[in-house]
């Protein structure tokens, strides 16, 4: 069922919100033993909200489209009074003191939060295997990963345990798991959605965004969370639907760097089929080049850890975590971080501290910032000729649990096609390729101009409407 369908059922009184929410929890209890998408559930408050929605329906009030809609929320987004572990031991006992802005906005719409979903610790990973609480499994094949870091959110939607979800995307963490789980996932333009109440990973790259079954549902969620927020100075006002372009006027670029060595042939063939289908429906394509793409991963693995190392400095075992006693301050930090952080988190804090240290700062960090600008300029240039870029979301099909855990570099390569949009601050959406029933899902990605979510979402809806 979709958000739209659920809304219609609710207002037509085909079911009550309380019945429906109860049904979702039954599905979760039946399926989540195997999938492990959720880290915690908020059943009491969810049913409480459902009752309020039912009372509003009984009174004949007109309901907004998100009223009563069951959502799953990544466990690095704060819901007041609920846990927010970021899948880390160090936040195991933490309970959020306030709502993230996205949560307040959805709450106002009457949306229902079923629970908090699993992720790679502090959103660092591509498989959800870096969670301190055990991995999430891909609902299409439970020996495979759901992607990451928002693997729990993507799996919850794919397994019908929620109608929509929120995730965060720093280098691909919404789009890559969306592709692996066969759902839609949108990373908005940097600044389109407030980051207030998101546990920070790399602040110049992080964006919150929605997951859903269809592009239309994804857009409904996006519309509810978009907008400037006084509490996030990097957020921006955007009337994202302003001047919606006619679909047939939108031109799509095919970047040769994204269809090159390293791309699994099955994934590549499926994306070519999408291009062919859109072409025969009248969409114009153009071959383009984004020459600095090959530096994106290296640049990301300098800038991101630098920001991670500063953002994670606050987890010292004093304010957060259960304080392990020690003889002096250094020992205290060492002990608490040693116990509270997993291996990948430690690796990135160490890497980030290194690239920011005196003597290396210019060689690594400053240089990476310059190359980041070149990557951004590549997009600016092609956006003179095309309105969006099409690419695979991931280089491979969903891989098996344990397949890449021993080799961080292999794992990092999972995000080779998603990272450039984060570095350039551009919106990107991953959409499942149709006709893969019984086979592992494949996603294709549309990357748009800044503040032009409307263009990529329109194109996505157009693709979904083709037979
Ligand atoms: N997988 C990427 C990483 O490990 C992206 C993470 C993210 O977008 N949060 O950094």
Image (cartoon, grey):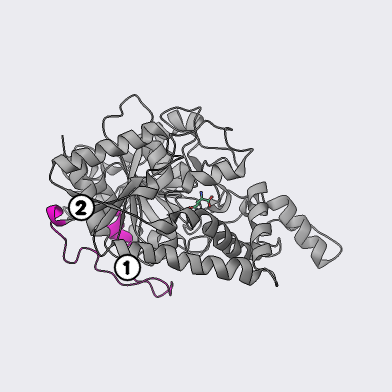
Single out the residue that lies furthest toward the right: 327
| Rendered-image quadrant of the N terminus | top left
Count all numbered tags in the image, as a single digit: 2
Place of residue 408 in the rendered image (x, y in percent of width and height, measured from the top left): 61, 44
Residue 83 visible (yes or no): no
Comparing 65 with 394, the one in front is 394
- Specify the principal SS of the magenta part: loop
Residue 232 visible (yes or no): yes
Report the residue at 34% width, 47% height from top. Answer: 391
Of helix, strand and loop, which one carries label 1?
Answer: loop
Q: Is 224 placed left or right of 159 in the picture?
A: left
Is residue 227 in the magenta section?
yes
Is residue 344 in the magenta section?
no
**Mark 2 near mark 1, Cβ–Cβ under 8 Å?**
no
Place of residue 177 in the rendered image (x, y in percent of width and height, measured from the top left): 43, 42
Of helix, strand and loop, which one carries label 2?
Answer: helix
State the residue position of label 2: 458
Q: Specify few, some or many for label 2: CA neighbours under 10 Å numbering under 14, 14-19, or 20 or more.
A: some
Place of residue 35 in the rendered image (x, y in percent of width and height, measured from the top left): 48, 32
Q: Is 168 placed left or right of 83 in the picture?
A: left
For the residues labelled 2 and 1, the Cα–Cα distance comes to: 19 Å
Q: Which residues are magenta?
A: 221-249
State the residue position of label 1: 227
Report the residue at 59% width, 67% height from top. Answer: 365
């Amino acid at each position: 069922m979709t958000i739209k369908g659920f809304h219609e059922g609710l207002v037509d009184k085909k079911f009550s919100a309380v019945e429906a929410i109860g049904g979702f929890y039954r599905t979760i209890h039946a399926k989540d033993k195997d999938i492990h998408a959720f880290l915690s559930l908020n059943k009491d408050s969810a049913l409480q909200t459902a009752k309020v929605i039912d009372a509003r329906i009984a009174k004949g009030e007109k309901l907004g489209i998100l009223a009563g809609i069951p959502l799953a929320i990544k466990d690095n987004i704060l819901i007041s009074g609920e846990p927010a572990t970021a899948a880390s031991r160090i936040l195991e006992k933490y309970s959020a003191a306030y709502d993230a802005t996205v949560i307040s906005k959805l709450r106002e719409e009457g949306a229902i939060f079923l629970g908090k979903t699993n992720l790679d610790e502090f959103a660092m990973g591509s498989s959800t295997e870096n969670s301190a609480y055990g991995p999430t499994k891909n609902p299409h094949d439970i020996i495979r990963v759901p992607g990451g870091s928002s693997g729990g959110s993507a799996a919850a939607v794919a397994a019908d345990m929620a109608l929509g979800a929120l995730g965060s995307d720093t280098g691909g963490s919404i789009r890559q798991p969306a592709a692996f789980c066969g759902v839609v996932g949108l990373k908005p333009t940097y600044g389109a959605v407030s980051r207030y109440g998101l546990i920070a990973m790399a602040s110049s790259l992080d964006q919150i965004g929605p997951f859903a079954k269809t592009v239309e549902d994804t857009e409904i969620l996006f519309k509810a969370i978009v907008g400037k927020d006084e509490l996030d100075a990097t957020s921006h006002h955007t009337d994202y639907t302003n001047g919606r372009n006619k679909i047939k006027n939108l031109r799509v670029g095919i970047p040769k760097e994204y269809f090159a060595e390293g791309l699994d042939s099955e994934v590549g063939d499926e994306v070519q089929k999408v291009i062919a289908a859109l072409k025969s429906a009248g969409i114009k394509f153009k071959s383009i080049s984004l020459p600095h793409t090959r530096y994106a991963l290296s640049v990301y693995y300098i800038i991101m850890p630098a920001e991670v190392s500063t953002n994670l400095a606050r987890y010292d075992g004093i304010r957060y975590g259960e304080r392990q006693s020690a003889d002096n301050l250094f020992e205290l930090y060492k002990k608490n971080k040693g116990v509270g952080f997993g291996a990948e988190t430690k690796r990135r804090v160490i890497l980030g501290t290194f690239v920011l240290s005196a003597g290396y700062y210019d060689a690594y960090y400053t240089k990476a910032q310059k190359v980041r600008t070149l990557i951004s300029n590549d997009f600016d240039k092609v956006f003179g000729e095309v309105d969006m870029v099409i690419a695979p979301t991931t280089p491979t099909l969903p891989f098996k649990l344990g397949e890449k855990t021993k080799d961080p570099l292999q794992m990092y390569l999972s995000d080779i096609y998603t990272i450039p949009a984060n570095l350039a601050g551009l919106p990107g959406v991953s959409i499942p390729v149709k006709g893969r029933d019984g086979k592992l899902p494949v996603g294709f990605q549309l990357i748009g101009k800044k503040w032009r979510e409307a263009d990529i979402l329109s194109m996505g809806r157009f693709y979904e409407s083709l037979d």
